[in-house]
Image (cartoon, grey):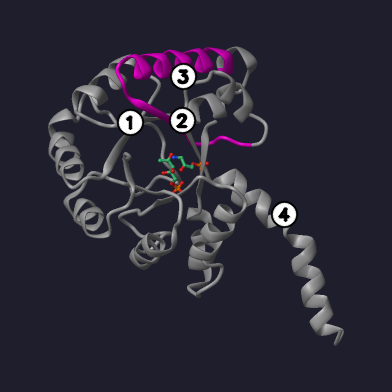
C-alpha cells in the first residue's frame, strides 16, 4: 500500500499572510497523522515564504510518522538538515520568483553540484530523494549519484490540458517508475496531484509514497467551513 505524505506548506502560507501564529502547520501535521497520513512533508524555501525554521524544528520533535524535508541543495539548507535530521530530505529545484516548483531537478546538468550534498546527507544517515521529471536520463543519473529514492514530478501530467497529453505524460511517469525500480531506487511521486487525477498514477503500481499538499489543504479549508462557522455563531449567539 503506498504511503501518503501530506504537505502542510499551505497551512503556513495562510499563517504568514497575517504574520500571526495560526493556522499552525504543526497542528495540521498532527491531525493529518491522526487521519492516517504516513508522512509529513514541508518545503523550507530559501525565501521562507511559508514554512519557517522553527516549524521544521518543532515538527522534528512531534511528527510520529516520517518527516520529509524538501529543500534546495544549498549549503544553508544542508546545514539545517544535518542539524534537524529529518527522516528524508528531498532535494528540489528552487527559483525565488516561482509561485511553486516548476519542474524536476536537472540532476544530469547539475551532477557536480549535487554530489557533495547527497553524499553528506547520506553519510549522516538521512534518506535522500531527488525530485526529478519523468525522464529516463534523470532517473539513471539520480541512481548514479547514490540517491536512495526519486520523487517523480507529476506536475506536467496534472497540468495537461487534454486527454492525449495527459495519457502521454502518464506513460512517461510509468516508464520512469519502472526504470527507478529496476535500478533499485525507491519511487515517490508528487506535485499537483488532486482528488481527480491521482488514481491513474496510483494504478501504475510501484510508487511507494505520494506527496500531496495543495489539494488536501484546499479541501480541508472547505470541508471544515461548516464547523468553523457554527462554532463562531455559537459564541456570537451566546450558546
Ligand atoms: C517539490 C514539490 O513538488 C512541491 O512540494 C513544492 O516544492 C511545494 O512547494 P510550495 O508549497 O512552495 O508550492
Ligand atoms: N512534492 C510534492 C508535494 O510535496 C506537494 O505538492 P502539491 O500537492 O502541493 O502540489
Q: Is mark 3 within 8 Å of ligand 2?
A: no
Local crowd size for mark 3, using a 10 Å CA cut-off: few (<14), some (14–19), many (≥20): many
Secondary element under disc 3, as helix, strand or loop, is helix
Q: Read off the residue under disc 1.
A: 149
- Spatial CA span between label 1 and label 4: 34 Å
Q: Is residue 153 left or right of residue 129?
A: right
Report the residue at 25% width, 53% height from top.
Answer: 81
What's the magenta region?
Answer: 166-194
Q: Are marks 2 and 4 in contact (CB under 8 Å)?
A: no
Q: Between disc 3 and disc 4, whose residue precedes?
A: 3
The reply to whether the C-beta atoms of the residues labelled 1 and 2 are less than 8 Å apart is yes
Q: Which mark is residue 208?
A: 2
Pointer 4 residue: 222
Where does residue 176 sit, x and y in percent of width and height? 40, 17
User: Which residue does the image show at 61% across and 21% down from the upper left?
Assistant: 200
Using the numbered discs, state the Cα–Cα distance from disc 3 to disc 1 in whole angstroms.
15 Å
Q: Earlier in the sequence, mark 1 or mark 4?
A: 1
In this rendering, which labeled residue sits more in front, label 1 or label 4? 1
Above-or-below relation of 135 to 51: above
Name the secondary structure under disc 2. loop
Give the Cα distance between marks 1 and 2: 10 Å
Q: Earlier in the sequence, mark 1 or mark 2?
A: 1
- Of circles 2 and 4, which is in front? 2
Amino acid at each position: 500500500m503506498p504511503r501518503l505524505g501530506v504537505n502542510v506548506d499551505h497551512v503556513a502560507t495562510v499563517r504568514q499572510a497575517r504574520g500571526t501564529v495560526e493556522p499552525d502547520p504543526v497542528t495540521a501535521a498532527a491531525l493529518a497523522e491522526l487521519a492516517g497520513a504516513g508522512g509529513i512533508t514541508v518545503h523550507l524555501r530559501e525565501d521562507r515564504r511559508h514554512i519557517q525554521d522553527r516549524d521544521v524544528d518543532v515538527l522534528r520533535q512531534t511528527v510520529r510518522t516520517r518527516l520529509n524535508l524538501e529543500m534546495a541543495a544549498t549549503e544553508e539548507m544542508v546545514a539545517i538538515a544535518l542539524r534537524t535530521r529529518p527522516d528524508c530530505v528531498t532535494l528540489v529545484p528552487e527559483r525565488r520568483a516561482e509561485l511553486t516548483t516548476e519542474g524536476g531537478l536537472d540532476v544530469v546538468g547539475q551532477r557536480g553540484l549535487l554530489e557533495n550534498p547527497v553524499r553528506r546527507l547520506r553519510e549522516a544517515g538521512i534518506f535522500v530523494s531527488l525530485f526529478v521529471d519523468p525522464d529516463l536520463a534523470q532517473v539513471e543519473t539520480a541512481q548514479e549519484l547514490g540517491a536512495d529514492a526519486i520523487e517523480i514530478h507529476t506536475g506536467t501530467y496534472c497540468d495537461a490540458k487534454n486527454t492525449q497529453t495527459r495519457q502521454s505524460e502518464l506513460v512517461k511517469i510509468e516508464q520512469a517508475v519502472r526504470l527507478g525500480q529496476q535500478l533499485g531506487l525507491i519511487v515517490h511521486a508528487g506535485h499537483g496531484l488532486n482528488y481527480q487525477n491521482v488514481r491513474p498514477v496510483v494504478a501504475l503500481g510501484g510508487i511507494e509514497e505520494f506527496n500531496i499538499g495543495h489539494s488536501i489543504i484546499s479541501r480541508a479549508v472547505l470541508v471544515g467551513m461548516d464547523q468553523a462557522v457554527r462554532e463562531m455563531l455559537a459564541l456570537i449567539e451566546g450558546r
